[in-house]
Image (spheres, rainbow, N blue to C red):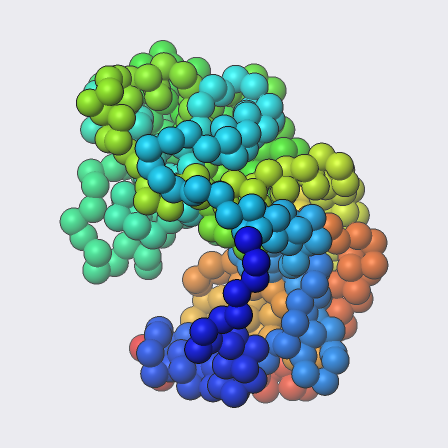
Amino acid sequence: MTDVAPQGFDLAKLLAERGDERYALHARHLNHQLPRMLHTIGFDKVYERAEGAYFWDAEGNDYLDMLAGFGVMGLGRHHPVVRRALHDVLDASLADLTRFDCQPLPGLLAEKLLTHSPHLDRVFFGNSGTEAVETALKFARFATGRPRILYCAHAFHGLTTGSLSVNGEAGFRDGFAPLLPDTAIALGDLDALERELKRGDVAGFVLEPIQGKGVHEAPPGFLRAAQELLHRHKALLIVDEVQTGLGRTGDFYAYQHEEGVEPDLLCVAKALSGGYVPVGATLGKDWIFKRVYSSMDRVLVHSASFGSNAQAMAAGLAVLTVMEDQEIVANARRSGDLLRERLTALVDRYELLHDVRGRGLMIGIEFGRPSSLKLRSRWTMLQAARKGLFAQMVVVPLLQKHRILTQVSGDHLEVIKLIPPLIVGEAEVDRFVAAFTAVMDDAHSGGGLMWDFGRTLVKQAVANR
């Protein structure tokens, strides 16, 4: 097929003419609070391009990405193998999404994904992490004939209505009731799990092996014990690896850190996309899929209009190939161990730094009440205005002074979460640790621009009450 010049549409020209309007366009037509928030904390940067673990602005300054698009950019931005795969699939002009044939790419991606999940048998492809969770909830309910799902306090499983029903953070749920009649338990509380299971109406228990909010890991042995309890009561273990999966924690899946754990349903997304085409996948046991799709009459009982599209499948295949060829999982384990060790060594040095935790390249840095009187009074001032302001005070100079993008791990938390691209190495670890040390030195000096910014945040928090 010959190339056809675009008729009336020139992307490069459009961006050149109107790219400077980006914040005004968002304020006028999209979520108006996003540009307002970015302006307030000084995150209203203009990035011109990106590659790997870095962004660049118009002046050519580089920025280290320790956020990876909330984990989407597992291979970094614009990985050449994924990019080439997308060019190839577009150039192939496939007869995609006819709905009444079976294209090869979905089967090939499912086959490749299942090689990393040998106890699972089948895959449903949707378009996002929340869709993957929605699929798991529906399949668990139908397969067991029971209505209720258990989940963990402080969990995050998505924001559509079903996944919101198993979201353990009240701030996301407020105002969207009524939700599904599901029940939260504390992460690690086996007694609570057994108590709920004894009621006989539980279809499954969904959890993240490491919670993204606060970076809290399930206690050793909890997943295996929970699995045994669930199966004893004929309920299913649903593991949400949307963020932790595909190498993030130093194994292909985070649940694999614990021997003998074999989820009945498994949710993945984010990094599978290569950062290009949204995709989510729900992996499950054969009997569950066969119960849901029990006859030809039920062939479309659960489907997605854009699920299994060729571009997403090509991206996913390219991602898994790169992960195997370039030993991405091993790199995540090695770089994550180095970063965590370097940061842990700072805990005794800084009284505001209380804990460093996580696995692989999913690391939480927690701040807490200092011991010295001068710092304690300032800490108390911040806490009285709004919990989480100190962590924000760290995130801002990391970007403004050191050109490193990070995030506070959740609302009202004094935790920074690091989830960089899985390709980072010693150079990126050195850069982050040096910058973080400089910010901590500034915070413990008791003066300077950092605490001035803290007072600005206090005023903003009080004004928003």
Q: Splitting the image into 4 quarters, where does residue 73 fall?
A: bottom right
What residue is at 44 percent from the left and 42 percent from the top?
95
Q: Is residue 208 above or below residue 342?
A: above
From the viewer's side, name the closer residue of 268 and 401.
Answer: 268
Q: Is residue 137 left or right of residue 244?
A: left
What residue is at 56 percent from the left and 19 percent from the top?
118
Q: Is residue 462 above or below residue 291?
A: below
Q: Is residue 24 left or right of residue 441?
A: left
Is residue 212 among the parts visible in the rendering? no
Is residue 318 among the parts visible in the rendering? yes
| Image quarter of the C terminus | bottom left
| x and y, in percent, of residue 185 in the image | 35, 36
Q: Is residue 424 above or below residue 224?
A: below
Q: Splitting the image into 4 quarters, where does residue 434 fall?
A: bottom right
Q: How many marks?
A: 0
Q: Is residue 129 left or right of residue 77?
A: left
| x and y, in percent, of residue 272 in the image | 55, 43
What residue is at 68 percent from the left and 83 percent from the top?
58
Q: Residue furthest left?
A: 178
| x and y, in percent, of residue 257 in the image | 62, 28
Q: Residue furthest top?
A: 232
What residue is at 52 percent from the left and 75 percent from the top?
11
| x and y, in percent, of residue 35 in the image | 44, 79
